Amino acid sequence: MTRRRSWMYFAHPSSPIGSFLSWTKAPSAMPMRRESPCFGTRPPRGGERRPMSARIRSASCPQGIQRSLRPNSTPLRIKSPRTGREIVLMIESILLFLALAFALTFPLAFGAWFWESRKRKTHAVESGFHEELGIPFEQDFELYHNAFSLCSKKVRVCLAELNIDYASHPIDLIETGSYENLSRHFLAVNPEGTVPVLVHRGHPIYESHEQIRYAANHATRGAEALVPEDPSLVVEMQLWVDRASLTGDDPIAGMASSAGNCIPGLTLPLFSAMIRDIPLHRILVGLLFHRLRVRPALFLTMKLAGLSRLRRLKPAVAIVERSIQQMNTHLDALEAKLDQGDGAWILGDFFSLADVSWVVIFDRMREADCTDLFLGGELHPQVTAYRDRLFARSSYAKGIWNHEHPAVRQGTQRLRDAKEASPQLRALLAGESVRPQGN
Ligand SMILES: N[C@@H](CCC(=O)N[C@@H](CS)C(=O)NCC(=O)O)C(=O)O
């Protein structure tokens, strides 16, 4: 009895739900029906009924409708363009309907995200060879990689140098179109969600500097192919491999230790030019599922700001400037090393994994249209000649040119055009200290 009373109170025409029920012709609290003259004008049960889906009620009984509303509710009167009849929309009811829809949508969306994120679990992985993990394979060597990714290029150049055949599995990153690296099928290969992943007879090797070492040690041409026999040279080689590596979850924090860590900062303007073509909802996938949400957040910021406003984003400007500065320090060291040496490569006459690691740094400078800041003319002449020798090797064509992605080519061109159009952007990308300006 008590329950019925409280339901009846809930359904009173003066309450939002009551007005909604009376508007949709759903059975309302009986005593109230009799009190409302409007209900008296309704056709009896079983008589003619207007479709509920219309969610409208014609103004055939405006007075009655007024009475069935709460005193302070606001009917919205619209004239139907087709029939010329007046339509009365009860705003309260619409708001209530929207509130109910929202209240249902939110938990549903959250539930769907929760369900999916359990299927797309991400976590950091330990670098190196993982014998305990098994991935379906068809060829001895398989490579999951991306055309644009710095580390993927390094492994492709290495495999080309070693003449290792491999099954190629291209994986999209957001820069080249979508977060395929966060798809269920790729996370089964690498739960960290990063490329490249080299797979040897079904066992993954994580981290590109480990992958090139592993490939060199397992090449049929033998370990001497890209790794010297002399242990002191191996130490020397490793030092230069590390100095070109992209490491850690926050490479920007480690720019002082490696030229590879300066690459994300130097690439910011190119990222900004490329992300323009990527639909927003694809970036949102990253915000929902990426292990390091700061990465998609950065892409989102660049997407919203656009290349033309990049120079006004103070943190981005600071990162670009610091990357240029730190890259110069690393190139100074490489210049000195090549100057002291008596061969074409970092270890003299021996072409090693160190050289494989540096070729991709120079290639990214080309893509990001910033080579002029570091090489050519008076700038690092030894390194410039070294870069030319690296680019002349067939492994460069095989591992990099043959995989060129149209989005990158377009991004580079767009970046060039933007620099031509904006002296401020040009100055920023030339490493000149440009303070964000008002216009
Ligand atoms: N230290 C790792 C870096 C892996 C890495 O961060 N890869 C980038 C491409 S170079 C990536 O997959 N990024 C995708 C993302 O973070 O969404 C390695 O050397 O393999």
Image (cartoon, rainbow, N blue to C red):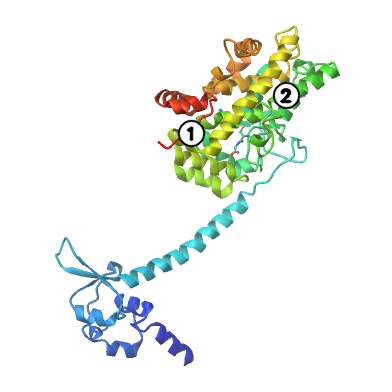
Give the quarter of the image for residue 92.
bottom left
Disc 1 marks which residue?
311
**Type of residue at label 2?**
Val
Q: Secondary structure beneath disc 1?
A: helix
Please indicate, yes or no, whether residue 385 appears anywhere in the rendered image.
yes
Nearest the eye: 134 or 430 = 430
Judging depth in this view, the residue of 220 and 67 nearest the camera is 67
Q: Residue furthest top?
A: 342
Q: Eyeballing the image, is 302 above or below 24?
A: above
- Count of all numbered marks drawn on residues in the image: 2
Quadrant including the C terminus? top left
| Mark linked to residue 231 | none
Element type where label 2 sits in the image:
helix
Rendering coords of residue 58 (x, y %): 21, 72
Ligand 1 within 8 A of label 1's CB?
no
Residue occupying the far left of the picture: 84
Q: Which quadrant of the picture is home to ligand 1?
A: top right
Residue 154, image x, y percentages: 65, 24
- Seen in the image, is 349 located left or right of residue 106? right
Residue 148 percent coordinates (x, y): 56, 28
Q: What residue is rendered at 46% in x and 28% in y?
A: 425
Residue 170 in view: no
- The residue shown at (62%, 26%) is 325
Whether label 1 touches label 2, CB < 8 Å? no
Q: Residue 170 falls in which quadrant of the image?
A: top right
Q: Which residue is mark 2?
A: 241
Residue located farthest toward the bottom when viewing the structure as drawn: 1
Q: Nearer the viewer, residue 318 or 60?
A: 318
Residue drawn at (74%, 39%), measured in percent from left and top? Answer: 126
